[in-house]
Amino acid sequence: MNKIVLITGATSGIGKACAVKFASAGYDIIITGRRNERLIELKTNLEKEYKVSVLSLCFDVQDKAAVEAAFKNLPEQWKKIDLLINNAGLALGRDSFEDADMNDWETMLNTNVHGLLYVSRAVLPFMLEQKKGHIINMGSVAGKEVYEKGNVYCASKYAVDAITKAMRIDLLKNNIKVTGIHPGAVETEFSLVRFKGDGKTAESAYTGLTPLTAEDIADTVFYCASLPAHVCINDLVITCTQQAGTYYFNRTQ
């Protein structure tokens, strides 16, 4: 029987790259996201290319009731989840605290923090029943150091870091590994979403850099998930060679 991995935010970027990586290694995959047409396309491609089983669940992690319903009605053969990758997350805006849109704040907190909590609590009973499991939470270097105009996005990722540490302590007795992965600059749709479709501004975030790719992060996630049962990577910060911390860059132009 293949291992099962559940990936939130799987329709693009790091989540999609993780789905491809784990499918290529023979995992059966549960993919979740808000964009059903992308989920269906990804499911079709993974099943065709890698001959694995894929279950797609369309919901917004911000919606507690939708999350609970999705896992309450999970088919029996999909309940033996070995690995949860809490990847769904976003940044919105890059404004000074006094100018920021409070609706953006709420969306970031609801997605990055509440969404992670909702999914984790919904999936955890399956791992507790098996007396084993692994949860990998996608944090950010923004959860390690605050930067100018990062305000609530940084706060949301600091919360992810704290929750990850708390989960690791509380779930230790249940033989469940918990890993935090904290990427620096990764070139995905992230900046385009952050700057609300402003492609020029989004592109400027990577000017003069060879940033990380979604595949770089997927490789790292897979490494953490593939270690022997007695080994757990607790916390991992990863940046491109031209980045140190959250705001120091060695740009070539």
Image (cartoon, rainbow, N blue to C red):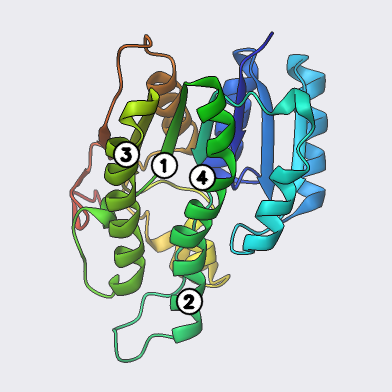
Q: Which mark lies nearer to you, 3 or 4?
A: 3
Q: Position of residue 186 (x, y in %)?
A: 41, 46
Q: What element does badge 1 sit on?
A: strand
Marks 2,1: beta carbons within 8 A: no
Q: CA separation, marks 3 and 4? A: 13 Å
Q: What element does badge 2 sit on?
A: helix
| Corner quadrant of residue 220 | top left
Q: CA separation, marks 2 and 4? A: 20 Å
- Relative placement, left or right, of 10 versus 210 is right
Q: Position of residue 80 (x, y in %)?
A: 64, 23
Residue annotated with mark 1:
137
Q: Residues within 10 Å of mark 3 (few under 14, many from 20)?
A: few
Q: CA separation, marks 1 and 4? A: 10 Å
Q: Amino acid at mark 3?
A: Asp
Looking at marks 3 and 2 on the same chain, the residue that comes earlier in the sequence is marked by 2
Residue annotated with mark 4:
120
Residue ranking furthest to the bottom:
98
